Image (cartoon, rainbow, N blue to C red):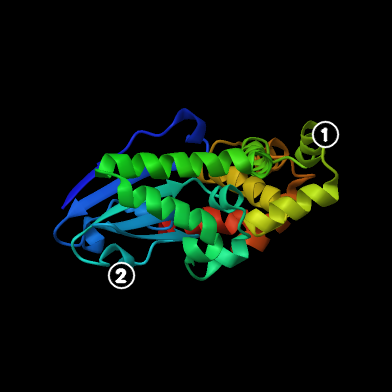
């Protein structure tokens, strides 16, 4: 099995993590695939002669899809977290449990794309056709793409409570509109996502031992006080920070 990666257009780097091409007479075994292929959303093109099957996956591409058609070329565009929904304007719930075939998503666009792929003379040309297709989707849905990319990155960098108000002002959106768009493409509300980010940052500080007192972790990460932090920690882990420090780390 031959595998290689294609360069990504700078405009797409905020949305596409990597582009993987697999070309072999034998289908790849799951253990032959790069580790990152597990758990990432993707656009998968399975190409054999003039036939092409195009599917969108919100989560991991199932092992049987990598083995499909045997002697085929597989081109996978792996998307960054939360990018595939706004790029293709598909609610996250629709992508949650099963693949979305492109001919069901948009028959006209799918037909135009498969015709272009059929006339491509090489794998490199097919990659370029798909590249231009994804780029056109990002351009067409630029507003939703920009909102989700900006919001998820912003809350990961600064998960304190006032970040939501800052984003609404910077994005010039009402809270209702913003929350509706965010939940549609991420699957949870922006408030819930912010709290997850806040907990995650605080958890890494706790785990690394970069604090003198538990109140340092609480105040550093925007919690009202130590009690507020402990309640949040128990909500996400079903244990307390002190119990985790005493027992959890030892178990690791």
Label 2: few (<14), some (14–19) or many (≥20) C-alpha neighbours in 10 Å:
few
Q: Residue at x 47, y 44 (%)?
A: 133
The residue beneath circle 1 is 169
Q: Nearer the viewer, mark 2 or mark 1?
A: 2
Lower sequence index among marks 2 and 1:
2
The residue beneath circle 2 is 64
Residue 18 is left or right of residue 240, and the answer is left
Q: Quadrant of residue 211?
A: top right
Q: How many marks?
A: 2
**Any part of residue 239 in sight:** no
Q: Residue at x 39, y 52 (%)?
A: 115
**Any part of residue 204 in sight:** yes
Q: Residue at x 45, y 39 (%)?
A: 132
Cα distance in 3D space between marks 2 and 1: 46 Å
Label 1: few (<14), some (14–19) or many (≥20) C-alpha neighbours in 10 Å:
few
Q: Quadrant of residue 234?
A: bottom right
- Label 2 with label 1: CB-CB less than 8 Å: no
Q: Position of residue 147 (x, y in %)?
A: 68, 41
Instruction: Using the image, tell me which numbered label, if any, was put on residue 205.
Output: none
Q: Position of residue 160 (x, y in %)?
A: 73, 40
Residue 18 is left or right of residue 175, and the answer is left
For the C terminus, give its image quadrant: bottom left
Q: Nearer the viewer, residue 195 or 35?
A: 35
Q: Nearer the viewer, residue 252 or 161?
A: 161
Q: Position of residue 165 (x, y in %)?
A: 82, 39
Residue 154 is left or right of residue 173, and the answer is left
User: Could you say whether the residue bearing mark 2 is in a helix, strand or loop?
Assistant: helix
Q: Residue at x 29, y 62 (%)?
A: 66
User: Could you say whether the residue bearing mark 1 is in a helix, strand or loop?
Assistant: helix
Q: Nearer the viewer, residue 104 or 212?
A: 104
Q: Is residue 16 above or below residue 97?
A: above
């Amino acid at each position: 099995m031959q595998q290689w990666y294609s360069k990504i257009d700078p405009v797409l780097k905020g949305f596409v993590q990597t582009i993987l091409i697999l070309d072999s007479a034998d289908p790849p075994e799951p253990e032959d695939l790069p580790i990152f292929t597990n758990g990432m959303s993707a656009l998968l093109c399975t190409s054999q002669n003039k036939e092409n099957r195009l599917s969108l996956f919100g989560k991991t591409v199932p092992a049987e899809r990598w083995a499909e058609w045997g002697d085929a070329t597989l081109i996978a565009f792996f998307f960054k977290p939360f990018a595939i929904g706004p790029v293709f304007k598909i609610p996250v719930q629709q992508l949650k449990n099963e693949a979305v075939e492109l001919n069901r998503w948009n028959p006209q666009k799918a037909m135009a794309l498969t015709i272009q792929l059929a006339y491509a003379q090489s794998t490199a040309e097919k990659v370029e056709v798909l590249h231009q297709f994804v780029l056109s989707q990002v351009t067409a849905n630029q507003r939703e793409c920009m909102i989700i990319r900006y919001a998820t990155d912003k809350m990961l960098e600064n998960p304190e409570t006032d970040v939501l108000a800052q984003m609404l002002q910077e994005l010039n959106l009402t809270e209702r509109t913003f929350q509706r768009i965010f939940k549609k493409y991420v699957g949870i509300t922006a408030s819930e996502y912010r709290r997850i980010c806040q907990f995650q940052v605080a958890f890494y500080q706790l785990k690394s031992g970069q604090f003198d007192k538990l109140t340092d972790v609480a105040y550093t990460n925007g919690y009202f006080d130590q009690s507020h932090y402990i309640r949040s920690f128990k909500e996400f882990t079903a244990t307390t920070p002190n119990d985790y420090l005493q027992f959890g780390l030892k178990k690791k």
